[in-house]
Amino acid sequence: MYFKDIIGQEEIKERLIESARNEVVPHAQLFCETGGGGAFPLALAYARYLNCTNRGETDACGHCPSCLKFNLFAHPDLHFVFPIVAKKEKKKEVCDDYLAEWRSFLNDRVYFNLDNWLEYLDAGNSQPLIYSKESDEIARKLSFRIYEADYRILLIWLPEKFHSTCANKLLKIIEEPPQHTVILLISEQPDLILGTIQSRSQRINVRPIAEEVMQAAMIERYGLSPDDALHVAHLSGGNYLKAMEAISLGEEKEYFLKLFKSMMRNSWARNVKGMKATADELASLGRERQKNFLAYCQHLIRENFVYRFQAPELNYMNAGEVGFSVKFSPFVNERNIVELMEELAKAELHITQNVNAKMVFFDLSLQLTVLIKK
Ligand SMILES: [Zn+2]
């Protein structure tokens, strides 16, 4: 991770870069955020910059020996601490036992939260922790001499997950840190961290990403139109992960609209082959998505019924949906709206009851051929 990978947060980047260049590096720094603001990638980019032997004005070089090791998250003087779900039977009890997973997790993303990590670990509902055994590991690692770097980095993600005995031992390390050791803590719930750790660390508040900065990023990275980008930025509240969620929901909606259109067109044209193909496609989605699709159809039917009243304030459709409604709305009227909704609700119920999905969707299309011409 580099500074350039992080959206906005220019003020913090400048401050961190200056600290490295002036060699005024506080030995304990606490990055705080509410989520999706970029605190973890900022801390890691800072760690990289501190040890880069060929620093640029605004970022690390990417090809010095130190950067090459950072590329793999495998620098001998870079130590990670993060919450895990211990598996005693597999002798996986400290962070290093999860290092391979952690590195490939980091390799795939810049922004993430604890849920993403737990999902990646397939941890189920187990409570993640930084276990007391970890503090012995930390003490052991810090007792060695530094291998090669200017700064040995201990990067602790979510110190609020420390087991209490571990937190106390960490406090001792922060009070008397070994030379050239920088401890970077990244927290989403700083209030849960020992007050003494907080007060001995320099605090860096990573604020939510500003709306116009997020909007620009959405345009640049995902090619959204300025209006859509602003909408996503607004929904995200400055949290990059939420913005990603909003975009992927958008994609799903578009896909559902496409399926809805073909289902309706096939039923209108009594195209049995087409009906079967669409039913097969729908059957290949998971059950959750099938239910979401049917809920989406009910939403669209309602919107098309309302569309005929020409009262835009009552309509909740995006541009693509409205485009389709211009032609489709006349087919939803007082004579069929109730039955249309009932058929869709019935299909949803059958999917929930695990009835064969191909049959459910094909049967639904047949019903629609009659209803749509009422
Ligand atoms: Zn470098």
Image (cartoon, rainbow, N blue to C red):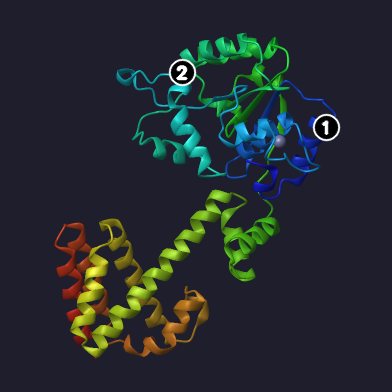
In percent of width and height, residue 224 lies at: 58, 67
Above/below status of 193 relative to 112:
above
Disc 2 target residue: 131
* Residue 324, quarter of picture: bottom left
Residue found at x 56% / y 35%:
72
Task: Give the residue type at disc 1.
Answer: Arg
Work out which quarter of the rendered image holds the N terminus and state it: top right
Q: Which mark is residue 21?
A: 1
Residue found at x 33% / y 75%:
260
Residue found at x 36% / y 30%:
126
Q: Is there any visible trace of residue 168 in the rendered image?
A: no
Mark 2: few, some, or many residues within 10 Å (few <14, many ≥20)? many
Please state which of residues 21 and 374 is positioned toward the viewer in this rendering: 21
Q: Is residue 352 left or right of residue 103?
A: left
Task: Give the residue type at disc 2.
Answer: Tyr
In percent of width and height, residue 154 lies at: 62, 22
Residue found at x 69% / y 43%:
3
Q: Are marks 2 and 1 in contact (CB under 8 Å)?
A: no
Above/below status of 304 relative to 244:
below
